[in-house]
Amino acid sequence: MKFLLYLLFALTSLLGLDQFTSSQVCQKCHPVIYKEYYSFQHRKASIFSDPIHKAVWDKHPLKKKKMYKCAKCHTPNDKEILTKLKNHQDALPQKNRAQLEGVSCVSCHNIKGIQKHEKSNTNILTTNKKTLYSARISEKNSNDIKYKIKTTLFGLVTKESGSPYHDIDFTNKNFYNGNVCMGCHSHKENAHKLQVCSSKISEHPNTDKENCITCHMPEVAGSFTTLKNSKTHRYHGFTGSIHKPEMLSKYVDIKFSKTTNGFDISIKNDANHPLLLHPLRVGELQVRLIRDNKTILLPISQFIRVIGKDNHPTPPWIATEILKDTQIQAKETRVIHFTQLLKKRDEILVKLGQYIVNPKMAKKLNIKNSNLTMFKIFKEERFFVK
């Protein structure tokens, strides 16, 4: 009886009879994926779960105007606030189910296409609330797959296909080339026509072989559903420089070479976007020389993008120019030279990492969480001088 009630709730939600479809509905058939999603930033995208987003929102002039335009990407499930924004009514975040879940499973699997704009892109959602988009190479030409139960050997073997809760469309090419992410993660332009952040994907476009999904959602062990015993699934914890950096560090290559007047450390960024994308983040290279059991900290290199106005750093909504940009770009190999002369048996310890929030900006935004302002290692290498 309990299962039947749950099934009824799931069906009415996905048929559009409920304004907001919680990802808990998806948990029944996708427990592994739901567990991964639950701990990741998509679920925590609202001001009620993301301390960085809240700190920026608290300073943003739109808060005084009662216009939470961030909802477009940070809480797309909250239809009420989106409707108010469209009607130019007061639209401030309320602590409801849609806000607390941020970006839900349906938020992404409802995306039919991406509409490109100079200011920021827009997700075009399907009007067929019963169908969800997904990707499966073996069924790339199959759409509107419905739930079926097939029995063989006189009813002794039962085989299920599709989902009892929704139909599935595997034909959406955006789910194969990674462009499904570009509605929110492409770029953001402020009122002064300055791109405050950009993935610069147009310079190195997504392909079917290398894209947002193949890198940030790699195949990992475990079945994607309880209805089918698959060996692997796409990781829905979404790897990044913060979350599971070890899974992404393979796209960064660090090398050491000795020179006549010191040595070089080269960093190659194999990703199709700058190494760090969030405007508040700061990359840092720390190099230590270990000689005769003594450690010498060599000059630190930082990779940062600073925006501002009149040659002074400012918040994104005020900025009119890029004051500084030393971020490692897509497909770039950055070489940092050190003038320290080396001896045989010297050891070079290299740490490439980041500050999630620039410590200077953290003070201005009143962010006191030390976990957000401490140095976090992305990749570490050791080299020995022969």
Image (cartoon, helix red, strand yellow):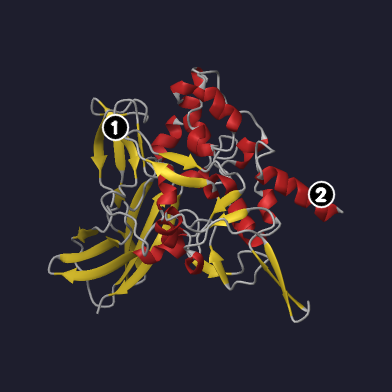
User: Looking at the rendering, in which quadrant would you find the C terminus?
Assistant: bottom left
Please rate how many residues cluster around mark 2, counting C-alpha atoms within 10 Å: few if below 14, some from 14 to 19, many from 20: few
290 vs 12, nearest the viewer: 12
| Residue 47 vertical placement versus 38 (above, below) | above
Residue, disc 2: 5
Type of residue at label 2? Leu
Residue 367 seen in render: no
User: Looking at the rendering, in which quadrant would you find the N terminus?
Assistant: bottom right
Q: Are marks 2 and 1 in contact (CB under 8 Å)?
A: no
Type of residue at label 1? Leu
Q: Is residue 320 left or right of residue 363?
A: left
| Residue at the right extreme of this rendering | 1
Q: Residue 235: where, in percent of width, then height?
A: 53, 61
Q: Secondary structure at mark 1?
A: loop
370 vs 137, nearest the viewer: 137
Q: Is residue 133 left or right of residue 210?
A: right
347 vs 110, nearest the viewer: 110
Q: Is residue 225 left or right of residue 109?
A: right
- What is the C-alpha distance between the residues marked 2 and 1? 51 Å
Residue 51 seen in render: yes
Q: Residue 102: where, in percent of width, then height?
A: 58, 41
Q: Residue 289: where, in percent of width, then height?
A: 30, 65
Q: Is residue 258 left or right of residue 154?
A: left
87 vs 279, nearest the viewer: 87
Q: Secondary structure at mark 2?
A: helix
| Residue at horizontal 48 percent and vertical 60 percent from the top | 217
Residue, disc 1: 194
| Residue 163 placement: quadrant | bottom right
